Amino acid sequence: MIFKNRSDGGKKLGEFLLSKNIENPLVIGLPRGGVVTAKEVAQILKCPLEIVIVRKIGSPQDPEYGIGAMSEDEECFFGPGADFFDIHGTEVQQIVEEERQELRRRIKQYRGRELMDMKDKTLIVVDDGLATGVTASAAIKFLKKKRPQRIIFAVPVGPRLVRHYLKELCDEIIVLEKPDHFLGVGNWYDEFEQTSDEEVIELMKYRGDVT
C-alpha cells in the first residue's frame, strides 16, 4: 500500500481503528507531520485531538538518525543506537540543549496551555510513520505518567523489528503496512512534504467533542 499523503494515511488508519470500537478515546498527534495524520483519525473516531511534543536527538554525525528523544518533561530516552556514542559528552549534550530549547518553543507555539486530562482514557498516539522508534518510545513513557487506561500506538507504516520492540512499552501497536525491507517513512507516501508550524497550529483548532 502506498499512501497518497499524510491525510490519506490518517483516513485509512482511522477507518481501521473505528472497527475496533475503542472506548473513551483521545487521539494524540506527534508533530509535526503526525498531527496531519492524527487529525484525520480524530475526525473519524469523533473524539478530541491533543498534541504532545517530542524532540528527536540526532547523532552528531547524522542529525536524521535518532539516537534518542526528549519528551515534554525534558526527560531523555536513548535507544540501542546510542551505545556507539558518548551520550554525556560535549557533542551529544549540545544537541540535547538545542532540542530542549526547540521543545519549549513548540509547546508554547503549538499548544500554549496545559495538556488535556488523560486519566482513565484510551490514548491513541498517532504519527505519520515509525522509523527508529525513539520518539515514539519517549512519547509513550511520558504519557504513561498521565495515568491513562490504555495506550495504543498507531501509524500507517513502520518496520517489523521496531514494531515488536514498541509492543513492550504500550498496550497495543497498530501498523497498517509492515515492510520487511524498510527504506524510510517517506518512501511509502506519494506526497511527503514537510509540515509547517502554521499547518500544525491550524490543525490543532480541531477539538472534536470537547465541551
Image: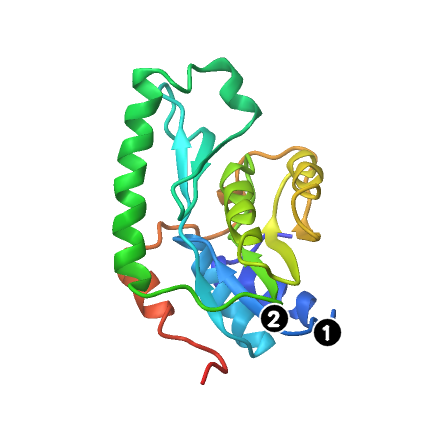
In this view of the protein, which residue sits in the foreground, 173 or 4? 173
Numbered label attached to residue 21: 1
**Residue drawn at the location 49% of the way across and 68% of the way down:** 117
The amino acid marked with disc number 2 is Pro
User: Image quarter for residue 12?
Assistant: bottom right
Q: Position of residue 74 (x, y in %)?
A: 38, 41
Of circles 2 and 1, the one toward us is: 2
Q: Position of residue 26 (x, y in %)?
A: 55, 68
Q: Position of residue 23 (x, y in %)?
A: 68, 73
In this view of the protein, which residue sits in the foreground, 162 or 106? 106
**Residue drawn at the location 47% of the way across and 69% of the way down:** 49
Kindly report the distance in space between the C-alpha atoms of the residues bearing marks 2 and 1.
10 Å
**Residue drawn at the location 58% of the way across and 52% of the way down:** 144
Mark 1 falls on what kind of element?
A: loop
Residue, disc 2: 25
Placement of the C terminus among the 4 image quadrants: bottom left
